[in-house]
Amino acid sequence: MAPAGIFISFEGIDGAGKSTHIEGLAQAFRAQGRAVTQTREPGGTPLAEKLRAMVLADAMDDLTEVLLLFAARRDHLLQVIEPALARGDMVLCDRFTDATFAYQGSGRGFDWQVLGQLEQWVQNTPGQGAGGTSFLRQPDLTLWFDLPPELAAQRLAGARLPDRFEAQPVEFFRRVANGYAQRLAAAPGRFASIDATLERHAVWQQITQALVRRGWLSIMVSNTKRP
């Protein structure tokens, strides 16, 4: 297995099962001797966690929300993600920029061109590409947990007090799902679509098979029933 760091993001609406499988995959990589950095967005650093709390709880206009998310992302990249990749870690991140396009872009109707410009500014990594050139940092693989919003709502019913995103109507999450589908269509080689309607072990099999195909995980792990 190559020593270079690998960046894997987990995307999907709440209730899709991302958190459970992030932990399971982290254990699988550690069992194979890989160092793992588990993190999340918004969040992942002390500053970004403060911004996360504001975004999830405080009333604000759409542009303010987007700017806070990208500010948190910039700090997260500089303080956590880039150093971990440079060390050769497997970086497992609960959501990344695709979530901003899905939630703020499609869910709230924010201008995708503006999001694209912010993406270019914030995720540009000078001197780390081939020959010392700059490049746009994106996950090496994005696992999209595709789940109908109605089923997600059933799974989350009564689980906890919803934040200001979780409290949105089902139609909002239909738009979010469409946003994820658009991101997948634009970068099909980066995405693996996971059918999150299935039982946990079947979802796990889809995840591990996607990683085995890329040579990042042993085929023995894909045959185990986790988590």
Image (tube, grey):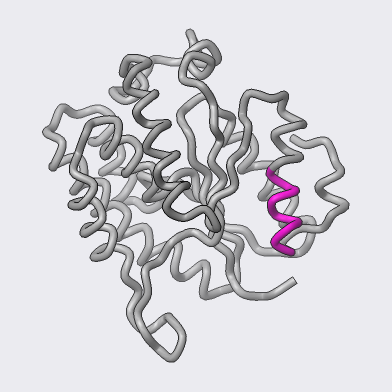
Question: Residue 67 location in percent, x, y?
Answer: 18, 48
Question: Residue 5 location in percent, x, y?
Answer: 58, 69
Residue depicted at 21% across the width and 59% down the height: 117
Magenta region includes residue 211: yes
Question: Residue 148 location in percent, x, y?
Answer: 51, 21
Position of residue 171 relative to residue 100, above or below, is above
The image quarter in which residue 123 lies: bottom left
Residue depicted at 42% across the width and 39% down the height: 180
The one of 86 and 192 positioned closer to us in this rendering = 192
Position of residue 174 relative to residue 11, above or below, is above
The image quarter in which residue 52 lies: top left
Residue depicted at 15% across the width and 36% down the height: 62
Question: Residue 109 location in percent, x, y?
Answer: 21, 34
Q: Quadrant of the N terminus?
A: bottom right
Residue extending farthest to the top is 158
Magenta region includes residue 51: no
- Give the magenta part as a residue range: 207-215
Residue depicted at 40% across the width and 88% down the height: 132
Which secondary structure type mostly characterizes the magenta part of the structure?
helix
Residue 10 seen: yes
Q: Is residue 164 left or right of residue 6?
A: left
Residue extending farthest to the front is 185
